Amino acid sequence: GILIKNSKFIEELTEVDAVVFDKTGTITKGDLTLTEILTSEGVEKKELLTAALTVASASTHPISRALKNGVSHIEGWDDFEVNETSGKGMMGTSFDGKSQIFFGNALWMETNGVEVPEDFVKNIPGTVSFVAMNGVLLGALGFNDTVRDDAKVCIADLKEMGVKKVTVLTGDRKAAAKRICEQMDIDDVRAQLLP
């Protein structure tokens, strides 16, 4: 499944001393599952999930798919127009203009004037998406990915072949990315990157 256009490139592979991987779908299976539901004080889980599903239903992003699969018994509201901003999140505006939902990362919340307490998600491992409605944080959802079975062996083989540095790039939070990379003996992680 690999096309090599020139034999010179095969020769140059013997001199490779650093390899960079994208995390999702390469090191991990890219098959996220919803593992944590954290509501703000006074917010019901169903309200949080309904708001998140309202905007996630318009997306094919892995987080949106994981949310839809994880709570298939709940439906979102259908009177919202939804827009997605790559690498940040989604915004839904009700047709009557009275309600607005934000679903995405902490930077997306901050950009849209939603305050997220610094230690709100400190105990959630994995990828975290926040949900807010009309400027108020409803809560956060935690998603986890599974390390590919052959990834650790691949990294060990690369190091045995003389690769000195293995780097992983991801949009995940640093703590979540570091946790996965520690399982595979990768010490250079670049997290919270945009596509």
Image (cartoon, grey):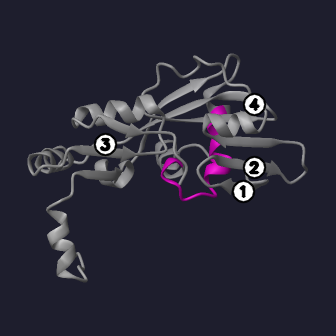
| Residue 192 falls left or right of residue 175 | right
The label shown at residue 114 is 4
Residue 21, horizontal then vertical, whole percent = 33, 52
The numbered mark, 2 or 4, whose residue comes first in the sequence reads 2
First of labels 3, 2 by sequence position: 2
What SS does tag 1 mark?
strand
Residue at which label 2 appears: 92
Q: Which residue is mark 3?
A: 146
Q: Is residue 100 left or right of residue 86?
A: right
- What residue lies at 41% left-to-right and 32% top-to-bottom? 176
Residue 83 — which label? 1
Q: Check the image and name the residue furthest to the bottom.
A: 5
Q: Nearer the viewer, residue 170 or 144?
A: 170
Task: Identify the amino acid type marked 3.
Answer: Thr
Residue under the image location 71 percent in, 17 percent down:
42
Mark 1, other Cα within 10 Å: few <14 / some 14–19 / many ≥20: some
Chain part drawn in magenta: 48-63
The first of marks 4 and 3 along the sequence is 4
Pointer 3 and pointer 2: residues touching (CB < 8 Å)?
no
Above-or-below relation of 133 to 85: above
Residue 115 sits inside the magenta stretch: no
Could you tell me the amino acid type at mark 4?
Val
